[in-house]
Amino acid sequence: MKAPLRVHPTNPRYFTDDGRRVVYLTGSHTWSNLQDMGMDDPPAPFDFDAYLALLKRYNHNCIRLWRWEPPRWRYGGQKVSFCQPHPYSRSGAGTARDGKPKFDLTRFDEAYFTRLRQRVVAAQKAGIYVTIMLFEGHCLQFAEEGWEYHPFHPDNNVNGIDARRLDYCTLKDARVTALQEAYVRKVIDTVNDLNNVLYEVCNEAGNYSTEWQYHFIRFVKEYGAKKPKQHPVGMTFQYGGERSGRNTDLFDSPADWISPNPDGGYRDTPPVNDGRKVVLNDTDHLWGEGGNPQWVWKSFMRGHQPLFMDRIAELTRRAITWAGREGDDIPGSEEIRRAMGVTRTLAQQAPLASMVPSDTVASSAYCLFHEGREYIVYLPEGGEVTVDLTPARGSLKVRWVHPVSGAVTPAASVEGTSKRSFRAPWDGHAVLHLKR
């Protein structure tokens, strides 16, 4: 991590930290990796050190650092969830709806920002990038008590502030916006000197939040421009049921990176990234909970970078509970985690800065290539693939990479200047790597 990330100057599908090499991002994130969260009050502490160790074991290098805004909520009549700490001090006179002291929205709880910094520092030491979630909109929309216990509900603060639920994610009330801006400045001040930081404005606020999110993307950039270091800012899918946003709202935004919804094939057949934005293709915005190794590789091959919404059940050694749900890992989690790590290994080995995605160079429709020099080809169904090597001159080394285990099987070299056919040495999906 030589410097903060910025969009690569010649291949804007990716970030760089030195203007030359690509920094490819992929990894598992989970809901309680910043604030402790659970069915008890107070909730049990999250083992962040074990989490980082797990990420390193899978060769992951990027997480979303989740924020939850109300101190308690519940979904679908299930058990109540609690979380702590929070950015605002609970030092006000009077009692909030949860029976605890009211929030003072003009005073910060330093414990929250101390933890924020400690976790971003720990991640940096582990070689892991962190997208800091500034606001969270899904709970505010859909949790049964997501608004009733929110700090900006008039019953829960001493400042006379009523953000009126979904208006919290709009610019309708200048007093609310000013308080939000003060909080964002505090976050930036807390982590500005670190190189592994990215920002995400808000998780899954609906389409009513578009201009508000654009405002905060610009606000982070403008405030950051006055600081020693500047960091990328992202905008993610505006989920809201009937109030959902469009991917065009993300592409039209001033954000450096985006996470889209399934429209356009991002879940099943991701489109080729044309370089308008860095795309962190996140299962949270495609399935909620879901995904498979094929999706990981299709995303990588089309110039995107996959992120996985992960329960991380292994950390607790027990069935986890979140929002009233109980269970172990999401089906296929192990294969998804391992596949993401293999894509990162290949991304580090290949000259990704000079490679572009194509759906025509290989008959499988999945190819990253530096014309005439290097080709990474994905076969979603395995079997045989034809690759157009007409621009290649001379001999190319050939190897097969297993997309989940990462095991490498060398094969005989081939000559370029024509189309060549290759057959995978095993059943099932496979990766072909050709290099001059």
Image (spheres, rainbow, N blue to C red):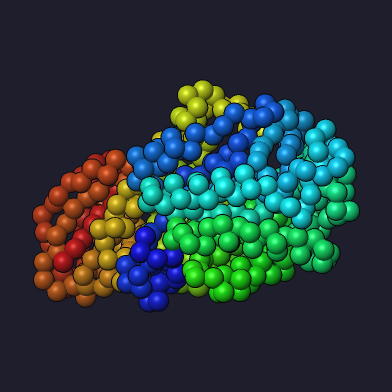
Q: Position of residue 365 (x, y in %)?
A: 37, 61
Q: Position of residue 407 (x, y in %)?
A: 23, 43
Q: Is residue 359 left or right of residue 433?
A: right
Closer-to-camera residue (91/254): 91
Q: Quadrant of residue 134?
A: bottom right
Residue appearing at x 65%, y 41% in the figure: 85
Residue 207 can be seen, yes or no: no
Q: Is residue 218 above or below residue 270?
A: below
Residue appearing at x 83%, y 33% in the figure: 99
Q: Is residue 7 left or right of residue 143?
A: left
The outermost residue toward the top is 318
Residue 171 can be seen, yes or no: yes
Q: Is residue 84 above or below residue 384?
A: above
Residue appearing at x 68%, y 47% in the figure: 109
Q: Position of residue 384 (x, y in %)?
A: 26, 52
Closer-to-camera residue (73/191): 191
Q: Quadrant of the C terminus?
A: bottom left
Closer-to-camera residue (192/419): 192
Q: Quadrant of the N terminus?
A: bottom left
Q: Position of residue 163 (x, y in %)?
A: 83, 55
Residue appearing at x 45%, y 69% in the figure: 6
Q: Quadrant of residue 235?
A: bottom right
Q: Is residue 232 left or right of residue 156?
A: left
